[in-house]
Amino acid sequence: MFGFHFTETMQGTYTRNGGPERDISFTVTARARSWLKHLRDHKAALDGTIRMDGFASNVPLSGELLINPVFGHIIKYEFQFTADDGKAYHFRGQKDVSVTDLVGTMTTLPATISDASDRPIANALLKFDKRDLPSFLGSFRPG
């Protein structure tokens, strides 16, 4: 059965080791190869790029998106990337969806970036810019 894909951009700031806030953004394409499988496991593959000022210069990323806002009340982003220092890092972020603040919780993504040993090295807060909603919705495609 056919799946779907869409593209999303989020941007915000990150702090590393209590240092100053710096810009972070990512653009990802989420792909589910089958609607039926997605309805069972709520997962979609992610690929795209991440930019973290002073750390990762628009580098490739890959991972997984868990989309379960209705029954699980979450949208979880997990992906890996190699930063400018040549080392691997892991991004984990989760939108905790609440019907009492649907817009706020669907557009705000707190996240942690960890090193290869799973030690947190940075915290981030990203937002979906509501002005991007038409292009986001327009990116949804079957297949």
Image (cartoon, helix red, strand yellow):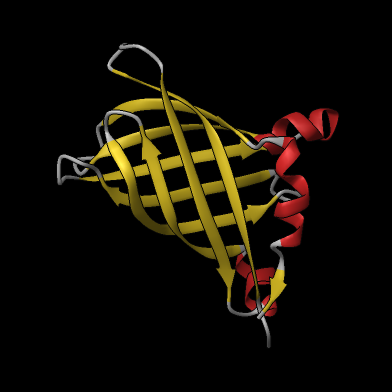
Residue at image coords 47%, 58%? 64
Q: Is residue 112 left or right of residue 11?
A: left
Q: Quadrant of the C terminus?
A: bottom right
Where's residue 110, x and y in %? 53, 30
Q: Is residue 87 left or right of residue 96?
A: left
To which quarter of the image does residue 34 belong? bottom right
On screen, residue 97 above or below 71: above
On screen, residue 37 above or below 60: below
Where's residue 32, x and y in %? 59, 72
Residue at image coords 63%, 76%? 37
On screen, residue 21 above or below 80: above
Residue 119 can be seen in this image: yes
To which quarter of the image does residue 19 belong? top left
Where's residue 51, x and y in %? 38, 40
Q: Is residue 40 left or right of residue 81?
A: right
Farthest residue, direction bottom = 1
